[in-house]
Amino acid sequence: MAARIARIVPMYWVLTSLMLVIVWIAPSLKTTEFTVMQAVTSYFFVPYEVKQSGSYYPVLYVGWTLTYEMFFYAVFAVSLCFAEQRSGVVLTAFFVVLSVLSLTRPSAYIFRFLTDPLLLEFVLGCVFGWAYRSGFRVSRWTAAVIIVAGGLGFCVGTPTSDMAHRVVFAGIPAALLVVGGIVMEAAGGWTGSDLLQQVGDASYSLYLLQAFTIPAFARVLTRADRLRLLPGDLICLSLVVASVLVSVLVYRAVERPIDIKLRALRRAHRQAQGARNAELEKHATTLTQRDRGM
């Protein structure tokens, strides 16, 4: 839990704070009114219902998935209290039961949040994770088929704005793409590249910064292309490339230094704790030997 918090929280808090500063300085950029309670719950990954939309978006709106992730991390941490073979069953059963409860169409937003079928997407990841650890591997051709199936899955249907049937139309295809990519790499289908590695390292910054980069670059392109001469596909590609470049720079300048510093602090804490435990154990051994008259 400490590792997850150290990895997720710092950049999210930094950019949540930046979002609050921006809308305070330039109120015209706001698309909704932020309340004090919404700001507080945003920092602590607590779902907060936005009355206008009936959804639970934090100040940094892309962080709604992090709220689910933190919930998943907490449940997963509890599952570690069970034997390894049982933890998988317990974890899967827990999320399946919650998802089934969504059929009752709960009205309270906290229960809508906790019973969203989106939780099944975590189960898909867990199932593949356990299978991969158990030695699940396939040939390159089979991996290619899985990837193609995932790509085609996105063409079958489109999730609605309220994310109804999201697991079917987005979750399963996404899971197939991830599974296919990982087993393809395991089969030696590709070795990756330094460029892709850098983009992958910056993926968390990219995920958070899209709330800033896409609107900002869209405004720039809109003003530059007043006659609407640029094709939409080129604009989308430009937004993606610009967002990736900014994210890589922010990762190197902000996220990575923070991560390195926190890792060093955690490592030093573990070493100090280990030294204290060793000293206590030595002291206890000395007392025991003295009591025994040794």
Image (cartoon, rainbow, N blue to C red):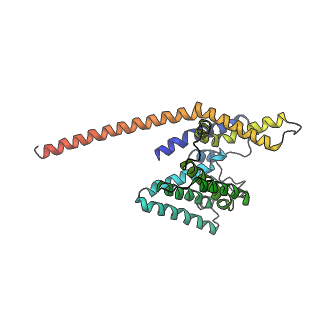
Closer-to-camera residue (10/148): 148
Closer-to-camera residue (121/116): 121
Closer-to-camera residue (152/48): 152
As drawn, the residue found furthest toward the bottom would be 104
Q: Is residue 27 visible?
A: no
Where 215 falls versus 89 (above or below)?
A: above
Residue at point 64%, 36% (across, down)? 247
Residue 288 at what x, y percent from top left? 17, 45
Where 27 falls versus 168 (above or below)?
A: above
As drawn, the residue found furthest toward the top would be 253
Residue at point 68%, 62% (across, down)? 165
Residue 191 at what x, y percent from top left? 57, 42
Q: Is residue 267 left or right of residue 241?
A: left
Residue at point 68%, 54% (across, down)? 151
Q: Is residue 71 left or right of residue 50?
A: left
For the C terminus, which image quadrant?
top left
Where 226 falls versus 58 (above or below)?
A: above
Where 280 falls versus 73 (above or below)?
A: above
Residue 33 at what x, y percent from top left? 71, 45
Residue 200 at what x, y percent from top left? 60, 41
How many numbered marks have been drawn onto this rendered protein structure? Answer: 0
Using the rendered view, name the quadrant where residue 216 is placed: top right
Q: Is residue 278 visible?
A: yes
As drawn, the residue found furthest toward the right would be 227
Residue at point 61%, 50% (across, down)? 65
